[in-house]
Amino acid sequence: MRLFIALVLLLALPALADDLPAALQKVVRDGGTVVKSFPAPDGLTGWVVRIQGRPYIVYTTPSGSYVMSGVLLDSEGRNLTQQYGDMYVPKPDADKAVAALNSDTWLVDDGKNGAPLIYVYADPNCAYCNKFWADLRPYVAAGKVHVRWALLAFLKGTSKGRAAAILSAPNRTAALAEDETRFDHEHEEGGIPELRPVSPDIQTVLAMHDQQMNEAGAQGTPTILVHRKDGWTIMYGAPPDMEKFIADLSR
């Protein structure tokens, strides 16, 4: 007998005239996007959906009146949800992310043009981003790496105001340095004062960067795009060995 562990939600809704099951239409109305469907055990239908840019596996019942999200195990304890994710969830596309960032005029440019380039999605209140920024300093100063920071705001209520202060500054690189050098590690707060109100343009940019990071398969910062001999790749979290990280970069 197969065991289903529902982690999120059971929705009972009246039927709606559309191609999607009634319950799944609720997900779409709330901002989700349906990517694809696939057959699942015991009459269930599996779906890949994106919610706030992140992919999830969900299931609808044969009636279409219920949608469930969670871990689906078979009688031998195999995690079918994980298998379906490996099979059906589109893999992060580093080249697509880099193409979007190449033309982004809202990045913080840090380092020498012509040095090996990396892109970093970062939150101004992120302690791990702060450590990565600090660890990069000698390599930036030596012209061994060129960093372009894509700011977003999701960690704290102050993240948006601090990101806005950096992006609105006449010298964004200096403003980012102020945020990082004055970082409050006890409270995990960046060091630059917030800018309020945040302009609609900057709110749009921060939301765009957040969506890009999610589509790259990440759920936190820093998310790093690096170029190596075999092309662009995505790293999640700061590298443990900075010397090797820098040495492996290519132009």
Image: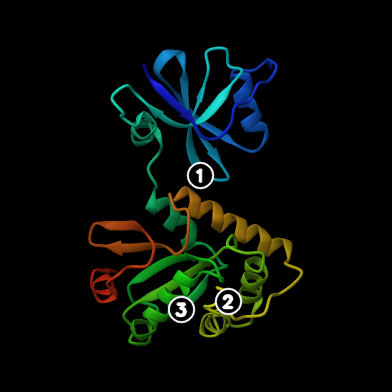
Q: Which residue is mark 2?
A: 190
**Closer to viewer: mark 1 or mark 2:** 2
Q: Which residue is mark 3?
A: 110
Question: Which residue is depicted at the point 46% across and 78% down?
Answer: 110
Estimate the x, y position of residue 199 in percent, counting from the top left: 73, 66
Label 3 secondary element:
strand
Label 2 secondary element:
loop
Q: Is the residue 244 above or below the residue 84 in the image?
A: below
Estimate the x, y position of residue 63 in percent, counting from the top left: 57, 12
Estimate the x, y position of residue 135 in percent, counting from the top left: 37, 79
First of labels 3, 2 by sequence position: 3
Give 14 or 94, whichever is nearer the viewer. Answer: 14
The CA distance from mark 3 to mark 2 is 18 Å
- Name the quarter where the N terminus is drawn: top left
Question: Which residue is depicted at the point 48% across and 37% down?
Answer: 56
First of labels 3, 1 by sequence position: 1
The CA distance from mark 3 to mark 1 is 29 Å
